Amino acid sequence: MIGDVDIRQFTLAKIQRENEDYRTERYMALLNQISAS
Amino acid sequence: MTAPQEFTAEAIEAASANAFTPYRDFLASGEPYRSLLENNPWMKAPSAGSELEWGKGWYYDTTVARKHPSWCDIALPRATKDITQMRRDLFEWGYCLIEAGVSEEQCARLHDRVADQAAAERALGIAHLSPAQQHVWSLVNKGADFVRCMDFDTEAVQAGPVIERLLDETLGRSWNHFSFISNISFPGCHPQGLHQDQSFIAPYNPPEAPILVNTVYILQDVNEVNGGTLLVPASHKMNRGADGFGPLPPAINLEANAGDILLMDGRVLHGGAVNRSDKLRYIITNSTVKPWIRQQEDFLLTISSEVLANASEKFLMRVGFQATAVRSMVEGYGYRGNGRSGDPNGSLINVRRAIDDGGYRHIGPLSMDDRRRGHPPVHPR
């Protein structure tokens, strides 16, 4: 969520969640690192 | 806000007179057709409505190779089932002929389906007609055998595995379909102008290899009477780069049997011949290209959801549904794609299905300030 924006409304987010196979732990670690900076 | 004076249209215009523009001459060169017609005035296409002239040496006034004085003693490609010979012919002459690439029964099915479709489109007033030909576009939606042909499935095209191998070897394994259509030439039609199928990249002229290969299904015997395809053998190697084309040898009428398949390098000069018979002349033509080329038929939008529902992963890849970091990404999806069949990191069929279902929601402008600005909440669909 960002404010009241729920990413689940975006079709891309659904497609990524259901299909992409590269969102590994490393990706999530990068995401956390960037979000914290 | 006032932009700097140097950025105004007037200033740009004033700074462009006699400016250093290193690529302008190349881009405006008109090659390869400028040199082609300068050095071969006999190749000029007749204007629409003019009388065709015979006995004056025009490119369309020709015959099959074995009857042509310039070609009869030369071993031009003949229909064969030998892939080694096909490879050699395709490289040396720019085309090869696959003997009985479709069986008699497969040929009859393809012919009858396309003839019926074409007649129905004429009857409904939705046919695509030109003075010389009817084009039946988007065959992909107009019969299961056409989809099988695009899959090189032996149920529809018995030489499918041979064609696939030759396409892999000539274009690299990641090639895409460019279009799949039928050209139907009317009795007494004017000839097409001689052209290269890949001249959409002109004046660029990569000499190393073609970027397009055309697979042409011949659905009835073709000869000097009904015309077949006019082509200039070995013309794929005759463009001299910066100097363009010099004088060329004459064109021939292709001679082949119903069911043979012509594989043609996209650089070969060719065109539809005059049809001097009293019957329509049918071919179906499936061009394939390097995958970074925009397709003649936009398959991502063209193919019906019914066809997509049963499509193989190989088919989806070859019509362009696999995105990579350099092509066809949707909202960033595909950046990690490798372009290969079935790769989930760029499988655009998921996007197309979401669009077909209705209500695809794109990501628009976002801001961390959304809440503070009091935007109404949005809800997941």
Image: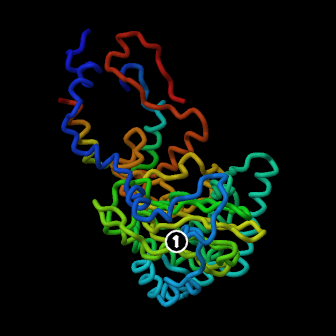
What residue appears at the point 40 percent right and 68 percent down from the top-left corner? B171
Quadrant containing the C terminus of chain B is top right
Closer-to-camera residue (A37/B313): B313
Query: Which amino acid lies under the numbered mark 1 shown in the image of this protein?
Result: Leu
Q: Percent from the top left, x then y, of residue B323? A: 41, 51
Closer-to-camera residue (B95/B1): B95
What residue appears at the point 65 percent right and 78 percent down from the top-left corner? B223
Circle 1 sits on which residue?
B231
Quadrant containing the N terminus of chain B is top left
Q: Using the image, determine if residue B64 lies above or below residue B203.
A: below
On the image, which quarter does residue B183 sit in? bottom right
Closer-to-camera residue (B76/B118): B76
Q: Using the image, determine if residue B231 lies above or below residue B178.
A: below
Residue B46 placement, left or right of A10: right
Judge whether residue B125 can be spotted in this image. yes
Q: Percent from the top left, x then y, of residue B93? A: 44, 78
On the image, which quarter does residue B266 sit in? bottom left
Mark 1 neighbour class, 10 Å CA radius: few under 14, some 14 to 19, many 20 or more: many
